[in-house]
Amino acid sequence: MQVLQYWSGDERGQKAPGNVNNFPIAIPVGTQTVHSVGAGWAAKLKGTKQISAVYFGEGATSKGDFHEAMNFAGVFNVPVVFICENNQYAISVPRKKQTHADTIAQKAIAYGFEGIQVDGMDIFAVYKAMKEAVEKAKAGKGPTLIECFTYRMCDHSTSDDASKYRSKEELEQWTKKDSIDRLEKYMRKKGLLDDKYKESVLNKSKDIVEKAVTEFEKLPPADPKDIFKYVFAEMTQQQKEEMEELFGE
Ligand SMILES: Cc1ncc(C[n+]2csc(CCOP(=O)(O)OP(=O)(O)O)c2C)c(N)n1
């Protein structure tokens, strides 16, 4: 429900529920890397067993934030896992124009910690890499960069048209490697999934989504004044004036 709320433009959707330790979504590309290193470092200073994990695209690795975060994590041996979803396109910018390095994973070497590249279309490979990196961070053995080599199956956003910069053939090639299809094939082969079970999972998922949509539609809309009120802890003079101008108060 909160996902729908957030993407409809209502910031209240950003509030992580209960004991879920999630940061709000970072809209500026790459800034989440420094937040995550800060959280991991705080956990280390407090002596908790928590670790921090941060997800970003290969486009984010061109940002200064990424390099500062990686450097800090290496120098202070921060319990953090960097997960780069290398889907080969930052909107229309292909991976080759993003970096001259052969892999994203190798960037970790310069910061003195391990970087690994995994088949991002293989759920088990990603799970194993993540599990090991988390265990390593928990054992005080420092950060890891995991590059998940994958592909973006759809347009970047509703305003994007990927057919303008990617060939049909390329998409077809990658569609054959679709990780969900691969998992389905594997599960069928192992006798873990049949048509009946698949249908029940799909129906259950549909119910969850329908329920979330119904709940979301019942929510009162956000107060437009929130745009002014919650950017800073206290409104600036300019914000006060702008709010007054808009609402006549
Ligand atoms: C600092 C900044 N510049 C530009 C944008 C616009 N923008 C949104 S997503 C995106 C591409 C991000 O590509 P990547 O980091 O590879 O992540 P992906 O979305 O492919 O997972 C850009 C340029 C932004 N959000 N923030």
Image (cartoon, grey):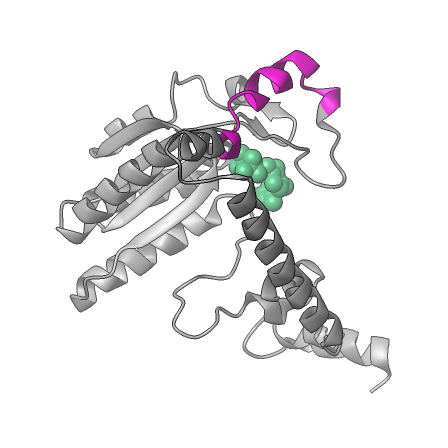
Q: Is residue 76 visible?
A: no
- For the point 52% across and 22% down, the residue is 95
Q: Report the quarter where the C terminus lies.
A: bottom right
As drawn, which residue projects farthest toward the top? Answer: 169
Dividing the picture into quadrants, the one containing residue 121 is top left
- For the point 63% across and 68% down, the residue is 11
- In the image, the segment drawn in magenta is 163-181
In magenta segment, residue 196? no
The image quadrant where one finds ligand 1 is: top right
- Where residue 166 appears, as percent x and y from the top left, is 67, 18
Q: Residue 85 vs residue 203: left or right?
A: left
Dividing the picture into quadrants, the one containing residue 144 is top left
- Where residue 34 appears, as percent x and y from the top left, is 39, 50
- For the point 69% across and 40% down, the residue is 157
Q: Residue 112 vs residue 100: left or right?
A: left
- Where residue 158 appears, as percent x and y from the top left, is 75, 41
Q: Residue 156 vs residue 121: left or right?
A: right
